[in-house]
Image (spheres, helix red, strand yellow):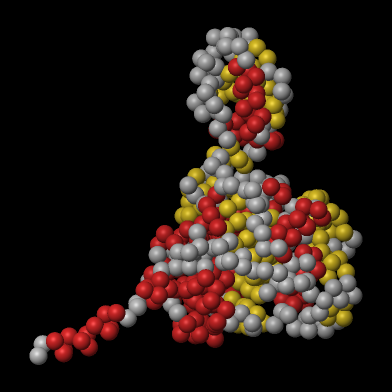
């Protein structure tokens, strides 16, 4: 008689539980950006029932209402992500602490197109400078009700004039990329999300100091809280690149945020995940069509996403200061290069199809900006030419005409430089490991390399240079801390 009782026990043991376990272990994490990823993570990490509740809490907008003559639908999904001001919702104490003074601009501080490939194996993030020269289509001002004819303005002003709808229409007109969904995040959700995650880790090869945001980071690795992270992504007065370098830091921050989520296993802690989700959704707005089923399907499809599957780029710029009457100084896109970039999005192709993650050492100054004269400090024939060729192949602007040094008994390779070019000297030294450096007052802008008998090779280096242009696509694993 003991056999019958055993039979009912078997079916429950045979029920397939694996799909449920897989849904709770998404590995792709936050590869898009804060707001988009939280929605997707909800879909993949908790399940349809929880996402339905999340969906109900999102503030909805209709950026596609009555839109006509839109670009053709391509493969994959395009999300327009905008970051708005919202500083009025931050306490006075925090505004003072993190130097968020002034009145809210009611404009977009960040504009990005996030493309998710049709096979859900790649995410491409293209930053659109907020000061980009743009022309709006005819529209009605959502604040005054005044009817406007097409006119020039800076891209971030489209939001102030016509809200999400004019922003979407303007971006589509400029890029011919059809926007499928719209997501909007403000300062408040940004700060609170970072704090809920316990901060993010940022690396910099040079000191970052901005007198406006009061960002002050020495070279090295730093763990930033929400307010500090906001200072990091808002700073525009660190160098001559202004908004372009700021966008590059924003891209680095997104990759660091992803790394934080995956390394702390937030997705496997339902209570922590709930807290992060509620924090973000307190100030996120999305289009009405981005619903529960879309989130679940997208989250499940992207469960195996990896860091190297994300790629970041900024629209190539032809003119840094393009004056426009009544608008001021703008950034003029490079028409041919930007068209190639947006065509890749429309055709669901990688931004840089032949790009492979660089293992080059990060430096402050791009090697292309450093002038170098090579001298052979040994009696080894052809050493000067070998060093010159190796430096040139790495990107340094060598003379191509190496010389023999006065001293032909140099054992350790020497770099001499004018003190005014010390940053360039550090970048050159990174390419010549083991070399020594010496400042020579009055030497001028050309650095000198006296090759010693210890020379073995040149190490590849690359700069944290905002003017990356068309070839500046970086993958997520390239822009996070080593």
Q: Nearer the viewer, residue 368 or 199?
A: 368
- Residue 70, position in %: x, y? 79, 75
Measured along the vertical axis of the image, is residue 411 above or below residue 90? above
- Tell me what residue is drawn at x 44 percent, y 62 percent: 262
Q: Nearer the viewer, residue 51 or 234?
A: 51
Q: Is residue 227 visible?
A: no
- Residue 427, position in %: x, y? 59, 34
- Tell me what residue is drawn at x 51 percent, y 57 percent: 307
Q: Is residue 323 visible?
A: yes
- Which residue ends up furthest to the left in the rendered image? 1
- Tell me what residue is drawn at x 80 percent, y 50 percent: 318
Residue 15: quadrant of the picture: bottom left
- Residue 39, position in %: x, y? 53, 75
Q: Nearer the viewer, residue 408 or 159?
A: 408
Q: Is residue 323 left or right of residue 77?
A: right
Q: Is residue 159 left or right of residue 90?
A: right
């Amino acid at each position: 008689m003991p056999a019958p009782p055993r039979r009912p026990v078997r079916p429950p043991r045979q029920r397939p539980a694996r799909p449920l376990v897989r849904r709770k272990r998404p590995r792709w994490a936050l590869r898009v950006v804060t707001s988009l990823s939280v929605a997707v993570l909800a879909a993949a990490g908790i399940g349809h029932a929880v996402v339905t509740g999340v969906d109900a809490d999102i503030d909805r907008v209709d950026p596609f209402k009555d839109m006509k003559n839109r670009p053709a639908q391509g493969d994959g999904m395009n999300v327009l992500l905008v970051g708005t001001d919202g500083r009025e919702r931050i306490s006075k104490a925090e505004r003072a602490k993190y130097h968020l003074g002034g009145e809210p601009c009611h404009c977009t501080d960040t504009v990005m197109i996030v493309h998710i490939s049709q096979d859900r194996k790649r995410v491409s993030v293209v930053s659109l400078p907020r000061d980009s020269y743009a022309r709006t289509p005819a529209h009605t001002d959502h604040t005054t009700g005044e009817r406007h004819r097409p006119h020039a303005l800076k891209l971030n002003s489209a939001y102030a004039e016509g809200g999400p709808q004019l922003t979407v229409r303007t971006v589509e007109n400029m890029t011919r990329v059809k926007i499928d969904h719209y997501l909007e995040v403000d300062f408040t959700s940004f700060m609170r999300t970072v704090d809920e995650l316990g901060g993010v880790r940022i690396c910099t090869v040079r000191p970052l100091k901005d007198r406006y945001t009061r960002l002050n980071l020495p070279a090295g690795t730093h763990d930033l809280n929400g307010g500090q992270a906001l200072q990091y992504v808002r700073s525009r007065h660190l160098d001559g690149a202004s908004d372009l370098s700021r966008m590059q830091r924003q891209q680095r921050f997104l990759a660091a945020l992803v790394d934080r989520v995956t390394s702390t296993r937030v997705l496997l802690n339902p209570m922590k995940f709930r807290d992060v989700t509620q924090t973000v959704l307190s100030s996120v707005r999305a289009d009405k069509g981005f619903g529960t089923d879309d989130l679940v399907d997208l989250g499940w499809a992207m469960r195996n996403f990896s860091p190297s599957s994300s790629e970041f780029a900024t629209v190539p710029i032809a003119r840094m200061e393009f004056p426009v009457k009544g608008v001021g100084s703008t950034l003029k896109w490079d028409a041919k290069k930007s068209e190639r970039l947006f065509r890749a999005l429309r055709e669901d192709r990688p931004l840089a199809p032949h790009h492979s993650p660089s293992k080059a050492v990060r430096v402050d100054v791009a090697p292309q900006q450093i002038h170098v004269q090579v001298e052979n400090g040994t009696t080894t024939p052809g050493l000067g030419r070998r060093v010159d060729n190796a430096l040139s192949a790495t990107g340094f602007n060598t003379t191509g005409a190496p010389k023999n040094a006065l001293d032909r008994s140099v054992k350790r390779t020497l770099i001499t430089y004018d003190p005014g070019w010390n940053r360039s000297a550090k970048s050159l030294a990174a390419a010549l490991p083991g070399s020594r450096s010496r400042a020579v007052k009055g030497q001028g802008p050309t650095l000198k390399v006296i090759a010693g008998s210890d020379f073995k090779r040149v190490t590849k280096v690359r700069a944290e240079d905002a003017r990356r242009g068309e070839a500046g696509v970086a993958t997520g694993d390239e822009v996070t801390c080593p």
